Amino acid sequence: MKEKSAGWRIGYLIVREKTISRLENHSDSLETFEPAKGKTVIALAANSSPDKVNVFLLDKPVVIKKGVWHDVAPLTTRSEVKIFENIEVKTAYHCLKKPVIV
């Protein structure tokens, strides 16, 4: 995959919250999610319907396309996830009508 970018930044999440009540969306950046420790789920929704959430086990690295709503939650007490995204990212947030409880 090729993507033009002014540079990338790496994030490392330690995830403890088992309730997903808000999703985020980056209209200008791809984003990778790479499981590092523990068991993690990733919640995804299409840009046009952020309340129609699908949850998947994050058992291998994935790339989220621009404009996809997303968040992660642990299945274990805590999990750790490595993230790559553009150095500058525009973020929009959407509060879910019904939270996802893991």
Image (cartoon, grey):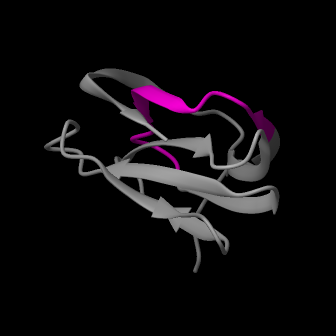
Q: Is residue 90 visible?
A: no
In-image side of 78 versus 55 (left or right): right
Q: Quadrant of the N terminus?
A: bottom right
Q: Position of residue 14 (x, y in %)?
A: 81, 36
Q: Position of residue 51 (x, y in %)?
A: 20, 36
Q: Residue at x 45, y 63 (%)?
A: 56
Q: Is residue 9 magenta?
A: no
In-image side of 48 versus 100 (left or right): left
Q: Is residue 11 above or below residue 62?
A: above
Q: Nearer the viewer, residue 79 or 82?
A: 79
Q: Residue at x 72, y 52 (%)?
A: 84
Residue 95 location, quadrant: top left
Q: Is residue 37 visible?
A: yes
In-image side of 99 versus 71 (left or right): left
Please report the bounds of the magenta region as a residue range: 13-29
Outermost residue on the left side: it is 48
Number of marks in the rendered image: 0
Outermost residue on the bottom side: it is 1
Q: Residue at x 72, y 31 (%)?
A: 16
Q: Nearer the viewer, residue 90 or 77?
A: 77
In-image side of 88 versus 69 (left or right): right
Q: Residue at x 24, y 26 (%)?
A: 98
Q: Is residue 13 above or below residue 93?
A: below
